[in-house]
Amino acid sequence: MGNCLKSPTADDISLLRGGDSPVDGQDPTLLGPPPPYQESAPVYHPAPNISRPAHLLTEEEQIKIAQRIGLIQHLPCGEYDGSKKARECVICMGEFSIGDKLRYLPCMHIYHKDCIDDWLMRSFTCPSCMEPVDAALLTTFDGSN
Amino acid sequence: MAQERSALLLHRQLGELMKNPVEGFSAGLIDDDDIYKWEVLIIGPPDTLFEGGFFKAHLYFPKDYPLKPPKMKFISDVWHPNIDKNGDVCISILHEPGDDKYGYEKANERWLPIHTVETILLSVISMLADPNDESPANVDAAKDWRENPAEFKKKVARCVRKSQEE
């Protein structure tokens, strides 16, 4: 069975936590050919308190994570242009600067895309109002039909 | 990347707390070179059994804060249903959301990435004033609190006195 979590699209890469760091400083050339699925060892969170590299996920967890990635990609995003009321990302406490990539949640809360996407991979709720994002998404879809 | 982000956020909070201290506690680092380990002094909240005490505690932040909560441990002795006998603080906002195997906590009472040292300590101060005995970390303290208030008061008073001498 194919592993859709490995698709190397630009959007997916931003969701892979620590995917760009080398594995514990080991030189892979000393270990012979690396086992499949361990080359970049991205870590996923099938539940917020569980961390697992992709190759150790159960099929069920892989499906859950793939669905989550899909849902996150459906959320609108944009760039800060100074026109919005929100000035600060409450996750990193940093002010928005012109050109920062933003993510808009259905509850109208706005965060840096990188800050909120990492959180949404763990818990699909808005940190400010605790609104479950999927429920709000479904309402949006229903409304548009 | 995650590490730079967490360090930056913690530096921001430390700077903010130095500039605008919050009533009820003071905060700093255990070691000036390690932004991930904080030492805080919590003032026993007025009009509670803990009034008059100065309780020292440590906060240990993970490298992926604020996606994950810090751990908090009282260094001073504190007799309280939600602080275990090693000093570890057990409150719902320091627990990650997700599968709560005991079903005690609602998801919205648990960790959120917008919690800061300030919001955590304000929760802990409110916990001191108002213990939650539904899921006690110190069963004996919870029993005292529920069934033997005089004994609870006596043990807390002992902690308050001890904290003043530290």
Image: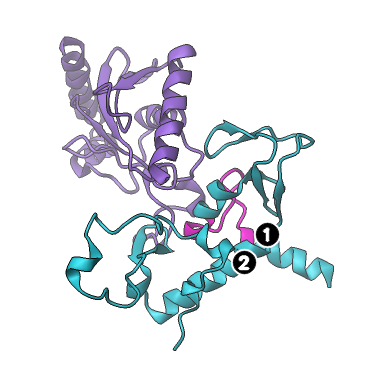
Chain colours: A cyan, B purple
Residue B42, x across and y down, in percent: 33, 20
Q: Residue at x 34, y 40 (%)?
A: B70
Region of the chain picked out in magenta, as a range: A120-133
For the N terminus of chain B, the image quarter is top left
Magenta stretch contains residue A121: yes
Question: Which labelled disc corresponds to residue A75?
Answer: 1
Relative height, residue B80 to residue A17 (above, below): above
Magenta stretch contains residue A137: no
Asked if one can make out residue A5 in the rendered structure from this viewpoint, the answer is yes
Report helix, strand or loop for mark 1.
Answer: loop
Asked if one can make out residue A134 in the rendered structure from this viewpoint, the answer is no
Q: Please state which amino acid type lies under the numbered disc 1.
A: Leu
Q: Please state which amino acid type lies under the numbered disc 2.
A: Leu
In the displayed structure, does residue B50 sit left or right of residue A86? left
Relative height, residue B68 to residue B87 (above, below): below
Viewer-proximal residue among B129 and B125: B125
Viewer-proximal residue among B132 and A89: A89
CA gap, disc 1 to disc 2?
A: 7 Å
Q: Residue at x 34, y 69 (%)?
A: A39
Relative height, residue B94 to residue B58 (above, below): below
- Numbered disc total: 2
Q: Residues within 10 Å of mark 2 (few under 14, many from 20)?
A: some
Q: Residue at x 35, y 29 (%)?
A: B128
Q: Residues within 10 Å of mark 1 (few under 14, many from 20)?
A: few
